[in-house]
Amino acid sequence: ETVSSDLNLIGKAKTRFGIYAEDIKSQPRDLFLSELAKKTDDDAFHIFGDVYHWFANIIVIFPSSVYMPLPLAIRNDDMRNEFEKFLVHFDTGIDSIEVESSTLKKELSHYSDEELSDLEEFISQTSAEHEEFGIRGSDMLLAFRRENDDLVVEKLKTKHQDAVELFDLKDESDGTKRLFDLVPLLFEELDNRVVFIDEIDRSMHPKLTVELVKLFYDFTEKKQMQMIATTHESALLDLSLLRRDEIWFVERQAQGSQLYSLDDFKVRYDKQIEGDYLLGRFGATPLFPALDSEY
């Protein structure tokens, strides 16, 4: 599909564009757009830099992605208060995030030799470049800062209602861990960004997933920000939450997959569409053939 624009290169700019297009043919590993974005001294090509940086600033969150800046962000009182507010709102049972002094040896003792080597190399390189940094692992939240020649290690732990002891991240449910990586989207300054979330519902209760999407709309209402998410959660099929043109289905086919919009079905704006989807009226649902009686 060709999309028209008001870009009109004329004269010398058009000639240079043609030269750049020819030059890129001898560099098959390079992207034409990224090469054009480097022409910062050429006013005629600034729009290509804008387009390139728009793509470069896209945030992609996979099911296994972790929000690496989180430990450092939580050490900031204002950020920690915001984070705690959302954890309470989502009924995680967590009252607050506490900071506990630790040592590198203690925190890395359970890793394999290979993992330990990689972590130590990362910590060594990062501490040489930054006064403060954090590590968000699958089971830990560590914040580091340099004081003179020493590396101070702080472990972030959770405090639960009425509990005397603090909890490590590994003690939390998978759903709570997932929230640790999604909640920052609600309070970080991410204006003019697009966020892709693969399997937004992974490990989370249906009501929690719906609430997360609602809050995303509320807290980004005045921002130039968009979220595109894949999900199997049918509870999100709610026209009071999403517009018809915001809901798309993927139908697996023999030679690939077809993507189509709910808007193609022209359903009423007040229709309860979740039930119709589960009945297969919009496609994109699994079909189970009868099993042979021998099974």
Image: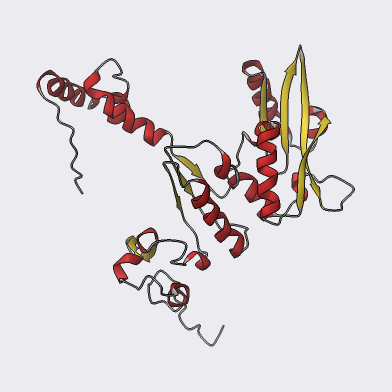
On screen, residue 198 above or below 185: below
The answer to whether residue 177 is visible is yes
Which residue is outermost to the front?
A: 222
User: Which residue: 84% across, 44% down?
Assistant: 166
Q: Quadrant of residue 204?
A: bottom right
User: Which residue: 48% across, 84% down?
Assistant: 290
- Of residues 64 and 37, which is closer to you in this image? 37
Q: Is residue 68 left or right of residue 246?
A: right
x%, y% of residue 128? 65, 16
On screen, residue 281 above or below 63: below
Q: Is residue 62 left or right of residue 158?
A: left
x%, y% of residue 279? 44, 79
On screen, residue 88 above or below 106: below
Which residue is outermost to the right?
A: 164
Q: Quadrant of residue 147?
A: top right
User: Which residue: 71% across, 33% down?
Assistant: 77
Total marks in image: 0
In which quadrant of the rendered image does the C terminus lie?
A: bottom right
On screen, residue 191 above or below 124: below
Which residue is outermost to the bottom?
A: 293
The answer to whether residue 28 is visible is no
- Of residues 81 and 153, which is closer to you in this image? 81
x%, y% of residue 250? 39, 62
x%, y% of residue 245? 35, 60
Which residue is outermost to the top?
A: 148
Q: Is residue 61 left or right of residue 194?
A: right
